[in-house]
Each structure stands twice: as C-alpha cells, then as structure tokens.
C-alpha cells in the first residue's frame, strides 16, 4: 500500500488571504493571523532550545510548553468556541515557575543573553513569546480567552528562569 503525502501548496493564499477555522477567508494581515504566526514562531524557537537541551527534565518542560502553545493557537483560531486554555493551565505554569525559581538563583542585574547557547535560545523564545503577548492584546485575546493571555505571560516568565538555569551561572544546584 502506498501512502500519499498531503498537499502542501494549495495556491489559495496567493491572493493574500488564508483560511482560519470557522472564519472563512481572512487577510494574512488580520490581527489573529499575525498572532498565530507569532505563537508559531515562539514554538519553533522553543523547539530549537529543546533540540539543544537534549533528553531530560528541561526537554519535557519545553515540549509541554509547545503543546500548550498549540492549545493557545486553538483559542486564537476559534474565538467563539469554549476555551482550550483554562485557569488550571495558568496554575500549572505558576507551579513550574516556582519549581524552577527554587533551584535557580536569579540575578539582580540586567541579563545580557548569550552566556550559553541553550540559554540564548531560551531567551530568543522568551522575547518572541513577549511579542506574541503584545499581538494577543492587539487581537482582542483578553476578551475572548483571558486565560490564554495569562498563559502567554507566564510562558515568558518560565522561559526567563529556564534560560538562567541553562546558563548555569545562576543555579543553586545542578540537579
């Protein structure tokens, strides 16, 4: 039995529009389309950091963040549908943040990214998540899906602390 690859190019977007779940055709300049692109870019940078992290706890954390980002994208794509991201997700991020902070001595000075390759990748991901957060506000996400916006805010915090831990210079322990 031979398997066919799915179509990659439909050419329907050649006119500057794209299809969004349940919304018909939208301009590629639409705020929600821009936000989806920002989240997708952030997830790709988290993936780059995950590839650098190798196996272990950090890899699992980053994969979980990427999966959460796909659910945030679901909220963006379907603003009239029930929330994909809930308060429990935000609380789980708060818990992960506290776990990381408990094992990482955070610097009191401004951090210049680039101490380590992994830390730099995490800092880029954090910066892109922050950009996505700003785009989420512009796209009206706080009104439609407030927990998704809170999750983006916590994601950047988790990435900041993970980057400091990856840099190693700020670790309380190297567990």
Image (cartoon, rainbow, N blue to C red):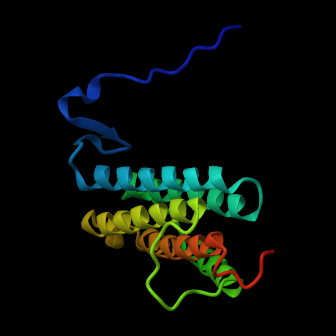
Can you see residue 78?
no
Placement of 130 over or under 107, stated as above or below: above
At x 42% / y 56%, what residue is drawn?
Answer: 39
Give the quadrant of residue 17: top left
Q: Position of residue 20 (x, y in %)?
A: 34, 43
Q: Is residue 165 left or right of residue 112?
A: right
Query: Between residues 61 and 30, which one lies in front from this camera angle?
Result: 61
Q: Position of residue 113 (x, y in %)?
A: 47, 70
Q: Position of residue 85 (x, y in %)?
A: 52, 66
At x 30% / y 70%, what residue is drawn?
Answer: 137
At x 67% / y 57%, what residue is drawn?
Answer: 53
Query: Between residues 142 and 163, which one lies in front from this camera angle?
Result: 163
At x 39% / y 69%, what residue is drawn?
Answer: 130
In the rendered image, the quadrant that contains the C terminus is: bottom right
Labels in figure, total: 0
Query: Between residues 91 and 129, which one lies in front from this camera angle?
Result: 129
Give the quadrant of residue 31: bottom left
Q: Position of residue 119 (x, y in %)?
A: 57, 66
Placement of 56 over or under 112, stated as above or below: above
Q: Is residue 66 left or right of residue 128?
A: right
- As drawn, which residue projects farthest toward the top? 1
Can you see residue 74?
yes
- As drawn, which residue projects farthest toward the right? 175
Give the quadrant of residue 5: top right
In the rendered image, the quadrant that contains the N terminus is: top right
- As drawn, which residue projects farthest toward the bottom? 108
């Amino acid at each position: 039995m031979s398997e066919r690859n799915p179509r990659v190019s439909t050419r329907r977007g050649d006119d500057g529009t794209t299809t969004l779940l349940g919304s018909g055709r939208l301009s590629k300049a639409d705020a929600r389309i821009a936000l989806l692109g920002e989240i997708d870019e952030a997830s790709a940078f988290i993936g780059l950091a995950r590839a650098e992290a190798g196996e272990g706890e950090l890899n699992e954390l980053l994969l979980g963040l990427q999966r959460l980002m796909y659910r945030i994208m679901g909220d963006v794509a379907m603003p009239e549908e029930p929330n994909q991201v809930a308060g429990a997700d935000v609380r789980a991020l708060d818990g992960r943040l506290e776990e990381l902070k408990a094992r990482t001595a955070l610097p009191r000075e401004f951090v210049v990214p680039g101490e380590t390759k992994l830390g730099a990748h995490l800092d880029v991901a954090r910066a892109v998540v922050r950009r996505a957060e700003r785009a989420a506000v512009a796209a009206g996400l706080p009104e439609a899906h407030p927990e998704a916006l809170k999750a983006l805010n916590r994601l950047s915090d988790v990435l900041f602390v993970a980057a400091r831990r990856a840099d190693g210079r700020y670790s309380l322990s190297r567990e």
